[in-house]
Amino acid sequence: MLKFVLRRFVYMLITLWVIITATFFLMKLLPGNPFGEVAAKLPPENLKLLKEQYGLDKPEWQQYLQYLGNVFRGDLGVSYQFPTRSVVSVIKQSFPASLELGLESLVIAIIIGLLLGIVAALKHNKWQDYSSMFIALIGISVPSFVIGPLLSLYVGNKWGILPSGLWEGPEHRILPAIALALGTIAILARMMRASMLEVSSLDYIKTAKSKGLATRTVVIGHMLRNAILPVVTILGPIAVNVITGTLVIERVFVIPGLGSQFVSSITTLDYTMITGLTIFYAAVLIVVMFLTDIAYGLIDPRIRMSGGR
């Protein structure tokens, strides 16, 4: 198991280095000036001093090595547009709201999605199955940037059941969490249903049923352990997608999260902020995938015995 974890850890570091390198040089290819309209108003000597301050007067390879060293020391740079704000400070200030929203929606999605999938499989080709898959179809067909405004308009504004925006009390979390969770519910429900149906046709399940074991014992003790394995493999990407995919939802419900900061940095061409937030999002994805691999290895010993192939 230790060798399996170390191998995955090395892969994680290599992947992170590739992403940092690609992001740095792609930012250099973007058109425009990193200092925006300010650069056009500055005298040439002041602009030269500004470039020296940010290290932009050096060759690109020197800038890259310096930036790489700063990143591994935890320094993602300072905003070009707002020199008093560092990328790390923005992350510390804004990410907790995005993380909280993402985790809440993920919990909702896992509970409801798995339950719908299990019910649909156990009641195959019955009204429960059709109802569950109809809900999943809606979740897949209607994106969050449509569900979010609809929930805010009707449930929040017209009916007044829940707050339509802002980020104050627990009741303000419900609508954005539901809007963000719907697509994930659909994915988990469909995958869990397919996995349960596949496992239910295996010989050892038929044997357990022929022994007269209770349905609950067969489902919990025999089916779920193997049926949930394919679901675990996608939980990592889904978790990151939910936590970092709050850009539109944060805008709709006026949530002071990192997604709003990311959108603002793109509109202002704040290269340092774009690069830093991209690397941060990538690091979150890589770490979650690393933890998912470990969890998968713990659930299925065959994975770590085969070296994760």
Image (tube, rainbow, N blue to C red):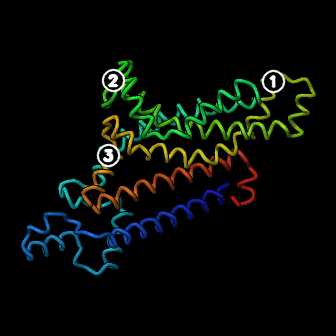
- Tell me the quadrant of the picture where the N terminus can be found: bottom right
Label 3 neighbourhood size at 10 Å, few (<14), some (14-19), many (20+)? some
SS category of the residue bearing label 3: helix
Place of residue 163 in the rendered image (x, y in percent of width and height, measured from the top left): 34, 24
User: Residues at badges 3 and 2 in contact (C-beta under 8 Å)?
Assistant: no
Mark sitting on residue 215: 1
Q: Earlier in the sequence, mark 2 or mark 1?
A: 2
Mark sitting on residue 260: 3
Q: How far apart, in angstroms, are the residues tagged by discs 2 and 1?
A: 45 Å
Q: Earlier in the sequence, mark 3 or mark 2?
A: 2
Residue drawn at x 37%, y 72% is 25
Q: How far apart, in angstroms, are the residues tagged by discs 3 and 1?
A: 48 Å
Q: Can I make out residue 170 in this image?
A: no
Residue nearest the viewer, comparing 194 with 1: 194
Label 2 neighbourhood size at 10 Å, few (<14), some (14-19), many (20+)? some
Task: Please tell me whether residue 43 is drawn above or below residue 247 in the rendered image.
Answer: below
Mark sitting on residue 157: 2
Quarter of the image where one finds residue 97: top left
Q: Amino acid at mark 3?
A: Ser
Q: How far apart, in angstroms, are the residues tagged by discs 3 and 2?
A: 22 Å
Q: Residue furthest left?
A: 43
SS category of the residue bearing label 1: helix
Q: Earlier in the sequence, mark 3 or mark 1?
A: 1
Q: Can I make out residue 28 in this image?
A: yes
Residue drawn at x 67%, y 33% is 117
Q: Amino acid at mark 2?
A: Asn
User: Residues at badges 3 and 1 in contact (C-beta under 8 Å)?
Assistant: no
Q: Nearer the viewer, mark 2 or mark 1?
A: 2
SS category of the residue bearing label 2: helix
Q: Amino acid at mark 1?
A: Thr
Place of residue 110 in the rendered image (x, y in percent of width and height, measured from the top left): 58, 34
